[in-house]
Amino acid sequence: TLKALLVILLPVHPLWKSPVSVPGGTRQSPINIQWRDSVYDPCLKPLTIQYDPSTCLHIWNNGYSFLVEFEDSADKSIITVGPLECHYRLKQFHFHWGAINEWGSEHTVDSKVFPAELHLVHWNANKFSSFEEAISEDNGLAVIGVFLKIGTHHKGLQKLVDALPAVKHKDTSVEFDVFDPSCLMPSCPDYWTYAGSLTTPPLTESVTWIIKKRPIEVDQDQLEEFRLLLFTSAGEEEKKMVDNFRPLQPLMNRTVRSSFE
Ligand SMILES: CCCCNCc1ccc(S(N)(=O)=O)cc1
Ligand SMILES: [Zn+2]
């Protein structure tokens, strides 16, 4: 809409934050995925996802997004196969979203921006003994990216949305006993995969990205609940938690592979 365009063009718009980049970074994220430049790799198998809902610990607002964290002291919630050579343990999932539906995702597909993007963050439990150790190592992390689009109400997400008022302010958390993140996966197994980085500091180049081709649908009210969260702590001047996405980074010398023709 014209309003959206005018808002974006304002020089003060958060979109024009200097693209924080790692000096000498050659594999930074997010990127635009040009569908026709992606290369079908017949060796890529479907991802195997085994999540144990009882490993869910709590939701917390870390002042950048809201995270749902999982107990990762054993191989209870893992992903394996797909583009991966090891098994990776689920540590947390979180989202990135915009102030309005015209933007919000970190990755784009043929320059199409989605209103939000889900990231499920896993660490390589074959090679490392903790998330903190894996974060700065080659093949240390695997992050599944799922696009959100506005459509029908998402029943599984609603349990999460209902808990958000309890974590409105930065550094607040609430216990979250049982939640199965596989309810947030699209049914289609197709994905793109490429070698990238974390999209927030420390921006380490340790991530195998697995971007699902199909988005999940959430309704307008559910996304509006995300936008009621705050970047700020209780008592500070309120700043709405919106536009918490990093600008696109150069592809450099990388190929995006697809698991589908
Ligand atoms: C050492 C503490 C780091 C906590 N934060 C890590 C982190 C940053 C970005 C992403 S993302 N947005 O690339 O999935 C995941 C996890
Ligand atoms: Zn993220």
Image: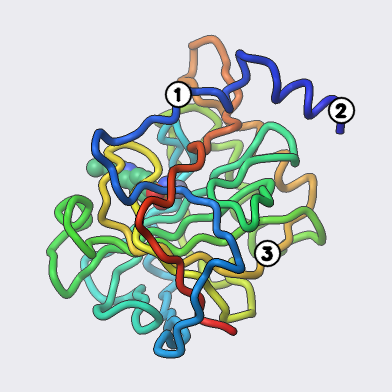
Amino acid identity at mark 2: Leu
> Quick one: 106 or 237, which is closer to the camera?
106
Badge 1 element: loop
> Can residue 21 be seen from the camera position used here?
yes
Q: CA distance from mark 1 to mark 3?
A: 30 Å
Q: Which residue is mark 2?
A: 2
Q: Earlier in the sequence, mark 1 or mark 3?
A: 1
* Residue 228 to residue 217: above or below: above
Badge 2 element: helix
Residue found farthest to the right: 2
Q: Is residue 166 left or right of residue 3?
A: left
Q: Residue at x 32, y 58 (%)?
A: 207
Q: CA distance from mark 3 to mark 2?
A: 27 Å
Q: Residue at x 78, y 45 (%)?
A: 221
> Can residue 58 be seen from the camera position used here?
no
Q: Residues within 10 Å of mark 2 (few under 14, many from 20)?
A: few
Q: Which residue is mark 1?
A: 18
Q: Earlier in the sequence, mark 3 or mark 2?
A: 2
Q: Residues within 10 Å of mark 3 (few under 14, many from 20)?
A: many
Nearest to viewer (mark 1 / mark 3) = 1
Q: Residue at x 37, y 67 (%)?
A: 55
Q: CA distance from mark 1 to mark 2?
A: 24 Å
Q: Which residue is mark 3?
A: 216
> Quick one: 157 or 33, which is closer to the camera?
33
